[in-house]
């Protein structure tokens, strides 16, 4: 169940955000700040409209989405946009959903890392892993 919106809105909103983020990450190796902050801000605004309980769930989702990514951002394994994107997933869908998405994202990221290593690449676009993890979390929820 979505945290911030009527049924069906969150998958569409997050789907659009993830498609744009994946496209820009693969093409330019960057994700626009307006996109990640827009996803977070709109999710928080919608949850605030639904009341303090929903706002609280949304904020917990934000924290559960961003906190596990922070150490990887600090050591250079992830970009800040990757962490903000995960936080956006948490804002829109809540902490339980983002935990599942994080799990599947980590598995997809590990697979991408192995492919990059085999190709002797030192870095790779990580947003496709986040998109994959979020889709799998939707399919299994």
Image (tube, rainbow, N blue to C red):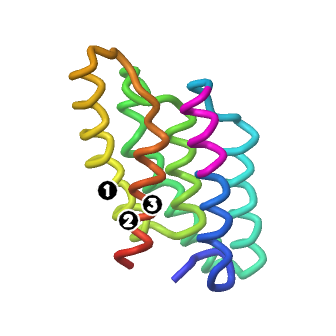
Q: How many marks?
A: 3
| 93 lies left or right of 123 | right
| 82 lies left or right of 16 | left
Q: Taking 110 as reference, is 101 above or below it?
A: below
Q: Which residues are magenta?
A: 19-27
Residue 129 screen position, x and y as percent: 40, 45
Q: List the residue tagged with mark 3.
A: 134
**Tags 1 and 3 touching, CB below 8 Å:** yes
Q: Give whichever of 128, 71 is nearer the camera.
A: 128
Quarter of the view holding residue 122? top left
Q: Residue at x 53, y 51 (%)?
A: 87
Residue 115 screen position, x and y as percent: 26, 30
Q: Secondary structure at mark 1?
A: helix
Asked if the stretch drawn in magenta spans residue 32, the answer is: no
Q: Mostly what secondary structure, the magenta segment? A: helix
**Tags 3 and 2 touching, CB below 8 Å:** yes
Q: Give whichever of 121, 72 is nearer the camera.
A: 121
Q: Taking 88 as reference, is 51 above or below it?
A: below
């Amino acid at each position: 169940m979505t945290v911030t919106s009527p049924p069906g809105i969150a998958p569409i909103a997050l789907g659009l955000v993830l498609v744009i983020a994946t496209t820009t990450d693969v093409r330019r190796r960057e994700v626009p700040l307006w996109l990640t902050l827009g996803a977070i801000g709109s999710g928080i605004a919608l949850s605030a409209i639904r009341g303090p309980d929903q706002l609280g769930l949304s904020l917990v989702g934000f924290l559960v989405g961003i906190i596990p990514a922070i150490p990887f951002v600090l050591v250079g394994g992830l970009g800040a946009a990757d962490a903000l994107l995960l936080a956006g997933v948490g804002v829109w869908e809540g902490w339980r959903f983002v935990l599942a998405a994080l799990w599947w994202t980590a598995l997809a990221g590990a697979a991408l890392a192995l492919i990059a290593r085999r190709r002797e690449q030192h870095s790779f676009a990580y947003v496709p892993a986040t998109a994959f993890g979020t889709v799998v979390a939707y399919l299994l929820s």
